């Protein structure tokens, strides 16, 4: 399995976690519990963004600078 495939699986997992928190936040009335779930959801969102950016970098065509440095290594 390639790195991109693993990252895509992890991305789907993080997105489903975020959806889970969103579903439960709708019905939570306790402010402390709501705050914890909101923080967890926001942490998942940060992870989602980071994974999306990493996947995009891996799938992007390397620019000329990356090609030059890769040849020199």
Image (cartoon, rainbow, N blue to C red):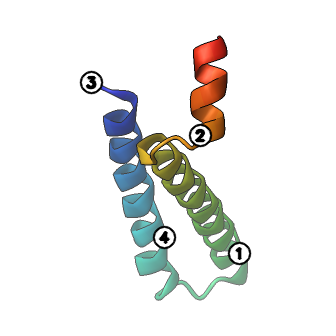
| Label whose residue precedes the other's in the sequence (3 or 1) | 3
Instruction: Residue 34 in the image: state x and y as whole percent.
Output: 64, 78
For image coordinates 52% across by 81% down, the residue present is 25
Instruction: Residue 51 in the image: state x and y as whole percent.
Output: 52, 50
Q: Look at discs 2 and 4 and give the one toward the viewer.
A: 2
The CA distance from mark 3 to mark 4 is: 29 Å
For image coordinates 72% across by 75% down, the residue present is 32
Q: Which residue lies under the disc numbered 4?
A: 21
The local secondary structure at tag 3 comes to loop
| Label whose residue precedes the other's in the sequence (2 or 4) | 4
Residue 1 - label: 3
Q: Look at discs 2 and 3 and give the one toward the viewer.
A: 2
Residue 19 - label: none
| Label whose residue precedes the other's in the sequence (2 or 3) | 3
In the picture, measured across the screen, residue 58 lies left or right of residue 1, that is: right
The CA distance from mark 4 to mark 1 is: 11 Å
68 w.r.t. 37: above or below: above
Q: Which residue lies under the disc numbered 1?
A: 35
Instruction: Residue 54 in the image: state x and y as whole percent.
Output: 54, 46
In the picture, measured across the screen, residue 61 lies left or right of residue 50, that is: left
71 w.r.t. 5: above or below: above
């Amino acid at each position: 399995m390639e790195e991109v495939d693993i990252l895509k699986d992890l991305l789907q997992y993080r997105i489903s976690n975020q959806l889970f928190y969103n579903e439960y936040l709708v019905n939570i009335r306790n402010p402390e519990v709501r705050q914890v779930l909101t923080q967890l959801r926001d942490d998942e969102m940060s992870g989602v963004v980071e994974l999306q950016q990493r996947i995009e970098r891996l799938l992007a065509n390397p620019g000329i600078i990356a090609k030059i440095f890769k040849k020199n290594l």
